[in-house]
Image (tube, rainbow, N blue to C red):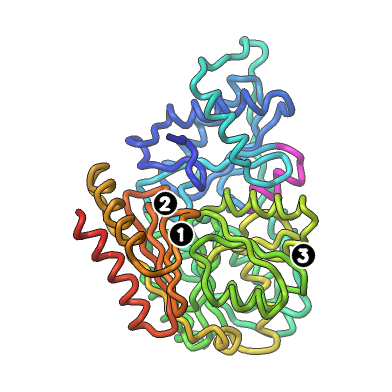
Amino acid sequence: MHVFGSSGVRGVAGEELTPQDAMQVAQATGSVWATDADRVAVARDTRTTGRTYENAVTSGFTGLGFNVDRLGIVPTPGLQAYCEGEGVPGLMVTASHNPPAYNGIKLVGADGVELSRETLDEIERALAAEPSHAGWDRMGTDRRVERARRDYRADVCQSVDRERIAGADLTVVIDPGHGAGALTSPDLFRELGCTVHTVNAQPDGHFPGRNPEPVAATLGDLRSYVRATDADLGIAHDGDGDRAIFVDECGEHMDGSATLAALAAAELQAGDGVVSAVNASQRLVDVVEEAGASLSLTPIGSTYIVSRVLQRQAEGTHVAIAGEGNGGVLFPDYRIARDGGYTAARLCELLADRSASELVAPYDDYYNVRRNLHVDDESARESMLSGIESHATETAADLDTTDGWRLDYGDGWVLARPSGTEPVVRVYAEARTPERAEELAGQMVGAAERSG
Ligand code: MG
């Protein structure tokens, strides 16, 4: 059993993940980093438990002899930018899109890239060993660093076509969902020359306005606000600001797969590589094919996508874009990091030519269904997975088991996989009609629930 899932460590704070656990993760991580570093950066999102966990990991590091730069509340891509700029590794206290009770840890190397599976395995081995401690005269200290958010915004501003965005005279509504993006995105888009309105934009770890996951069900306020202000675009982030999901100028939800396809269509040249996960939309498959690019699919989760991007780059492929339909997008020429603010700025560049609804209109003819099946305990989960496996092997469709069970029917596909971070089994389906997508999802859900 891995301590680190596909997106770091997550759990209900105080139960599945205690402050002591967090300190031990910092100690084990520090023991691996100690050969190359004597300073680390620590940041957090807005969760109510964030400061407690920040204090725990900071003590873990200083007790080993590291000096700690405490960046405070910063989006994960802001920590990654700081790590790359300073050449120091970093630890992010965040549970990303999970509900308020959760917290967790993401780890970043001194190059600003999240750690590879191999390094995480090394840290897991170190977790099993007795932690070492520095003597009283060798312990490190910590200091507040106030400039990380400002530097992150400046970095994004310099890396996009600011003139083009400002020239488009856009009005945007930003919904950071009370997360870390609340302290960066509103100012960022003002600096890019947009007129900015905000909703759910006070940092608040109780997440009073909406849950941190930016999905259609949680973005009703944003849709209303876009309509009420006659804005050109609504921009929503998750708790740590590495994802961006959009609302068009009519106040309609834009599917994350459609915006990924639109961003890819604008970015791709023949011969480029694209990396996505095994739940990749047919929209992306079509865009990649049309551009003469090539697509690699990985298990779901940013760790796998980042590893594959590095692998394809090492093979000499120019990876122009990577990411998933959940709004987590990487532009590797900029940085090998999912970045909600940068992604939204790149989308704004495209709005200089056409409206948001026109941008995704070519990708309207596919329909996605997602279901979360809650499991009460391990035996319910096992029984559900065995029902899914029987269905997958008995059905006349192409089966891919890269991560879970993906069945390709030609006119659509369905994927079932257990979540790495929550007690749910997720079912995804896509087809050219809503009825067919519902049918494919329904068959999979039926197989899973019959067994339970
Ligand atoms: Mg996130």
**Residue 231 position within the rendered picture, expressed as x and y whole percent measured from the top left:** 54, 84
> Disc 1 marks which amino acid?
His
Specify start and end residues of the magenta stretch as a single range: 77-88
Examine the structure image and report whether residue 83 is included in the region drawn in magenta. yes
The answer to whether the residue labelled 2 contacts the one labelled 1, judged by CB atoms less than 8 Å apart, is: yes
In the rendered structure, which amino acid carries the disc numbered 3?
Ser
Q: In the rendering, at what x and y percent does residue 309 appear?
A: 68, 54
Label 1: how many residues lie within 10 Å, few (<14), some (14-19) or many (20+)?
many
Residue at the disc numbered 1: 178
The reply to whether dot 1 and dot 3 touch (C-beta < 8 Å) is no
Q: Where residue 205 is drawn, which disc sits there?
A: 2
Residue at coordinates 29% horizontally, 51% vertically from top-left? 386
Q: Could you tell me which quadrant the C terminus lies in?
A: bottom left
Q: Residue at left 30%, top 57%?
A: 390
In front here: 331 or 22? 331
Q: Secondary structure at mark 3?
A: helix
Q: Secondary structure at mark 1?
A: loop
Label 3 belongs to which residue? 159
Disc on the earlier residue, 1 or 3: 3
Amino acid at the residue labelled 2: Gly
Which of pointers 1 and 3 indicates the residue nearer the eye?
3
Q: Is 398 drawn above or below residue 179 in the view shown?
A: below
Cβ atoms at labels 3 and 2 below 8 Å apart? no
Q: CA distance from mark 1 to mark 3?
A: 26 Å
- Depth check: 37 or 292 in front? 292
Q: CA distance from mark 3 to mark 2?
A: 30 Å
Q: Residue at x 66, y 83 (%)?
A: 351
Q: Alpha-carbon neighbours of circle 3 within 10 Å: few (<14), some, or many (≥20)?
A: few
